Image (cartoon, rainbow, N blue to C red):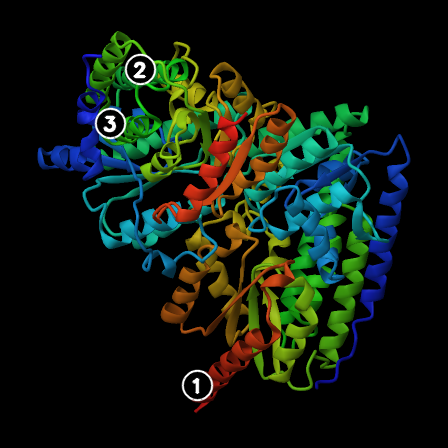
Amino acid sequence: MSQRVPIRSTAKMKELMGFYYMMAKAGENDPNQKIAWITSGGPVEILHAGGVIPIYPENVAAMAGTMKISDEICAVAEEQGFSRDLCSYARTDIGSALSGKGPLMGSASPKPDFLVCCNNICGTVTKWYEELQRIFNVPLIFIDAPFQYGIKDRPEAIDYMEAQLRNMIDIVGEITGKPVEWDKFMETLELADRAVKLWREIQDLLQHKPAPMNSFDTFIHLAPIVTLRGTQGCIEYYETLKAELLERIEQGIGTLEKEEYRLGWDNLPVWYKIKFLSERFSQHNSALVVSTYTRSFCYQAEDRDISNPLRAMSADYLAGYINHGIDFRERELYQMVQNFSLDGLVMHSNRSCRAYSFGQYELARTMEEKYDVPVLLIEADQNDTRMWSDEQIGNRIDAFMERVAGKKKRNIA
Amino acid sequence: MSLNVRELMKPFMEVQDDLYCFAKRAKQAGEKIAGYLCTYSPQELFHAGGYFPVRVIGKEGGTPLADQWLQPYACSFAKGVLNLGLEGDFSFLDLVVFSHTCDTMQNLAEAWRRRVEGAPVIVVSTPNLNAGDIALNYLKRELARVKEEVENISGSKITDEKILESIHLYEKHRNNMKILYQIRRESPYLISGTDMFLVVLSSFVMKKEEHNELLEKLIRDLKSITPEDVKKPRVLVGGSVCQAQGFIQSIEGTGAVVSDDDLCMGSRSYVIPPVPQGEPIEMLAQMYLSRIPCPAFYKPGYDPAQVYIEKVKSGDVNGVIFLQTKFCDPYAFNYPYIRKRLEQEGIPSLLLEVEQNQPVPEAFRTRVEAFVETLMNR
């Protein structure tokens, strides 16, 4: 088993996130404090600028998954008629909303005053938030981010986003009873922009050999960029983390005793098996150094107009990996392989996420045949443990690593 | 009764042997065929552009080729049509049209574009927000863009006059279908739901001009018949797609009559409010957004249960059968709420999970039988 020097900043992140959840819980009982539930790809900057506390059902569901309580919470939704084939985050969240059970000190998230749903991550959130609207009987702001089939994003789609975001700014003002101040909003966008860039820099530091942390860490350190994007606290945290990673690079600290192989990860993590996967890959001296999932939170549009921040924001919210077709994904994956010197790719075929997973077979084939990159496809689920078998997946990882090792040896020889 | 219903149904039955016999004949005569996968594809534009639009529908059969593209947790409709596409069944198409709806269709469009040889693929970015000026403006721009794309592919301009002609033809067709739906609500025993399904199926693959003629004759003939005095439980069938007549036939085999539906392969495509006059692209955009939304879409203020309750009450329906295509997320998300509301209204319902590309299983019939029996005893 490899030795690991723990990442100090983790404690600071726990503190930051703990404080945030405490504030959110306190906000629930404060009639002047509005709380909104929002999707992970949603335009949270408008909420921060309007003084609204955002709650991320996806984050909360992932916490439930990590704490291994998602199965029993999902069962509550299933009893109400929600099919087991539906997204396990949605089932976890709906089950939590219906039962009051959840990972935040044993209870569910603070109740929302309104909901914000942006479908730039999937169509499932559209239906999930419709259900939340029925459960809580509160306003729903729906932001329709058209899926971009081509590599270049369409200008009419950016116009459509901009009109919707302007509309959202007005609605948030109406709900809180205080119009969102433009200056405050611009300042929030500036803070968000800095945080997004930091988050990208941090992930790019993993291009270094050995990588100063691995993707399993990155999954954990994702929380602030999702939740607190647009706040000072988020920037401070990522500056701390970045400094620590630079220090680790300087001292040559990696995450393994010997980093022999470098892998990329596609799709959401398997939250309840992070430890298992991390250990299994470590046994083969292989580090996961990049993932399409954590990079999804630092996409900025390619030709964004920085002189017009709202316009740039409108383009950014279309720009994510999973809001794009296969040609775009192919390009991104191959860039990852090159930039991070990957020896292979691990693709989590995630039963919960059709938006992310369909197309992976084609991408895997393309990576193998066109670019000669070994790919491992793991059939699993982000939160539903009933799909998983340690033995089966473990064996597949072992076999895959043999293939990766064989190829590397041949390449060297 | 002098008219024989089987005689009346004959012209619609040709599709039972080959769904695309009309398209293939037209193709042989030199016409261009556009295949669309979703009824939100603006067929009027393709019709105006000189294409004969037919709906791409799957059939019974395995999906070994599509399984190379889509995981086991993809819906059977997507897999079924993709498999046919990969096998070359749709090689007679000159154009393939997708509309953005759900995550599965989105990836199906990508699969088709990358791997199915032949016709160019157009994807219409239909807004998933189905109300308000912002969405309307986006759809208008998108339809204008699609029109241009069709013009570029076909090499000929599509005039406003042509689009208007097509709009009127399609609206006339919808009106005829609406009348038929109304007749069936009032007298569901004149023709069975199984026959009605054939009428619907043929409506997607025949020329609207020809289908209009057939419909008008059918409506005249049906109106001349005095309904027999029969009493069967009336069932409404709800779901997303339903491509096999077998489901309806099996339900009616137990002694019920399927008198109405909430299906995109059914009333959702036809029972649409009249289009207000205006500039053609605007008319089309208005029309598509005024539909009872596909379950994948969000329409502020729209209540998915209300449609069921209204149909049940106005059509003396005795029970609802949900044909839930396995892995169709949008409909599965609607189901618990609709069921709950039906329960509150005292309307019995039954959920049946179905695979679109497989024969109707014995268990399906058994469960329907038990359900219909409870309806008879109420």
Can marks 2 and 1 be said to lie on one chain? no
The three-letter code of the residue at mark 3 reads Gly
Pointers 3 and 1 in contact (CB under 8 A)? no
Q: Which mark is residue B49?
A: 3
- The quadrant of the rendering that contains the N terminus of chain A is bottom right
Query: Which residue appears at 38% of the width and 59% of the height?
Result: B67
Viewer-nearest of discs 3 and 1: 3
Mark 1 nearby-residue class (10 Å; few <14, some 14–19, many ≥20)? few
Question: Disc 3 to disc 2, how far (Cα)?
Answer: 24 Å
Quadrant location of residue B162? top left
Viewer-nearest of discs 2 and 1: 2
- The quadrant of the rendering that contains the C terminus of chain A is bottom left
Up-down: is A95 above or below B71?
above
Viewer-nearest of discs 3 and 2: 2
Q: In the rendered structure, the residue with mark 3 lies on which chain?
A: B
Q: In the rendered structure, the residue with mark 2 lies on which chain?
A: B
Up-down: is A130 above or below A404?
above
Pointers 3 and 2 in contact (CB under 8 A)? no
The three-letter code of the residue at mark 1 reads Asn
Callout 1: helix, strand or loop?
Answer: helix
- The residue beneath circle 2 is B176
Left or right relative to A176: residue B184 = left
Single out the residue that lies furthest toward the left. Answer: B29
Query: Which residue appears at 63% of the width and 34% of the height?
Result: A130
Q: Is residue A295 something one can see in this rendering?
A: yes
